[in-house]
Image (spheres, rainbow, N blue to C red):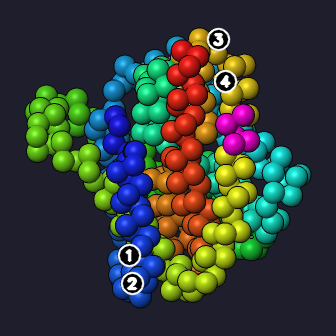
Amino acid sequence: MRVFPNGFGFAALLMLAIYSAWVWPEIAREVNDWAGGFLSKFVLLFLFFLQGLKMEMKKLLGAFENPLKLVAVQVGVFICPILMIFIGYSLNFFEPGWLNAFILLAFLPTTITSSVVYTRYAHGDADFAIGQSTISNLISPFVVLLIWGFLQEEKLRLTETAEMELMAVVFPKVFLLTLLPCFLGWWLSLHPSVQKRVSSNSGSYLKYFPSVGISCLVFFSMGQVISIEGRETCVKYADELLSPLVAGWIILVLISLVWSRCVEKPFERRVAILFCLSQKSLAMGLPMLQILSDGQNASFSYWLIPLVLFHFIQLLFGIPLIGFLRKFV
């Protein structure tokens, strides 16, 4: 199941991708213009195919043992970040111009691997985290699509008929790139020969694909952004966003602690919920942004930079949180 990239190895790859894009932005932009759209779709399709291939149905179905708690956790994945944004906006933690980018970030799914690994290291219920985070990733493409349409409605100036036509085009695309490959991967995993090959040494190399694929997307996307916006503007954006995002993540953790306490009594389950609510997926968010925006317009940096920064923040600050939580288990 854990096919999405995790840990500091992935963080190091991301740093390398960003550095390379910083040094060679024109190369990244040329490759992005040539194959960026195809690559993002291929990465997203193959990520979901691998997720289906590695899916442990027993653990996934375990999340449905209490439907009310399942709904409470999945609602919390979106509501807790929205509450974080509302608090930050009320306290003027960030410029109002970044509001839409933060809202889209709030509706991204939880990161499967980091939430599961952090839960395990904190002695929480890792199996529970697997089920909840997987469900979050399965429903998120449609949630993100709806939120994107809402945020872009004024800009696109869609009539009711045009909006329906847009949905008729985009919804099948999202279905073909997410749920269908996930189902196909799960169906293939039922065959003993496929199971044997996946568990073999040759199949073990599949686990490296997400890290490499997402790092390539970061290289192409950041190169596009740096080439269009310029290095000074990108540094200005990062400097402007770093403190608000750190403060936002701390607020999100506090809200998630309260939410998890309301949903579950066992502390191990509460730890799992905490990490499911406070981790946002770059592996899902970046390909979705590429698909929805085509990665070509000048506003792409507006959506991308907060996502990449927040991902680093949650990885780095999640480590001391693990040590803190282990004291109570």
Total numbered circles? 4
Q: Which residues are magenta?
A: 250-254
Looking at the rendering, in which quadrant would you find the N terminus?
top left
- In the rendered image, which residue does mark 3 sit on? 265
From the top left corner, tell me how far across and down residue 177 is, in percent.
41, 54
From the viewer's perspective, is the residue at label 2 or at label 4 nearer?
2
What amino acid is found at the position of numbered circle 1 in the picture? Answer: Ser
- In the rendered image, which residue does mark 2 sit on? 24
Marks 1/3: CA distance? 46 Å
The verdict on residue 252 being magenta is yes
For residue 217, the mark is none
- Between discs 1 and 3, the one toward the N terminus: 1
Q: Are marks 1 and 2 in contact (CB under 8 Å)?
A: yes
From the viewer's perspective, is the residue at label 1 or at label 4 nearer?
1
From the top left corner, tell me how far across and down residue 129 is, in percent.
49, 27
Marks 1/4: CA distance? 40 Å
For residue 20, the mark is 1
Relative placement, left or right, of 247 versus 279 is right
Marks 2/4: CA distance? 44 Å
Looking at the picture, does residue 195 appear above or below residue 203? above
Element assignment for label 4 = helix
What amino acid is found at the position of numbered circle 2 in the picture? Answer: Trp
Marks 3/2: CA distance? 51 Å
Element assignment for label 2 = loop
x 39%, y 68%: residue: 17
Rate crowding at label 3 as few (under 14), some (14 to 19) or many (20 or more) other CA atoms within 10 Å: few
For residue 260, the mark is 4
Marks 1/2: CA distance? 6 Å
Viewer-proximal residue, 63 or 25?
A: 25
Looking at the picture, does residue 71 appear above or below residue 293? above
